[in-house]
Image (spheres, helix red, strand yellow):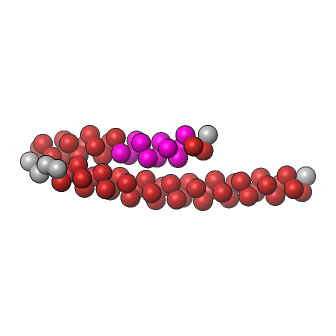
Amino acid sequence: MVFVRLSSWIIFPLIVALLFGRLVDRVFSIEPYGTLGLTTLSFLFSLTILFRETKRALKNLKEETEIHRKG
């Protein structure tokens, strides 16, 4: 379940950035800078969320491990 949640934080922002970036490129005639800029922002956003989710998953794993050791 963790893998699906983490991989979705990579795929969905990237798809949105690519589609919206193409639209921005066409509307403002700035190809390829709109797509590149939004893809870069989505990558940074994904990294931030992945870091936070990984920290949360490791914390939960640590808590579960401690419960099993005590119980």
Can you say whether 64 is above or below 4 in the image? below
Residue at image point 48% right, 55% down: 49
Position in image of residue 25 (x %, y %): 15, 46
Position in image of residue 12 (x %, y %): 40, 41
Residue at image point 85% right, 52% down: 68
Residue at image point 54% right, 43% down: 5
Q: Is residue 32 magenta?
A: no
Most distant residue in the right direction? 71
- The count of marks equals 0
For residue 11, side relative to residue 33 (left or right): right
Image quarter for residue 43?
bottom left
Position in image of residue 60 (x %, y %): 70, 54
Can you say whether 45 is above or below 9 in the image? below
For residue 47, side relative to residue 20 (left or right): right
Q: Is residue 5 magenta?
A: yes
Q: Quadrant of the N terminus?
A: top right
Most distant residue in the left direction? 29
Q: Magenta region's main secondary structure?
A: helix
Position in image of residue 37 (x %, y %): 25, 55
The residues colored magenta run 4-14
Residue at image point 42% right, 42% down: 11
For residue 2, side relative to residue 25 (left or right): right
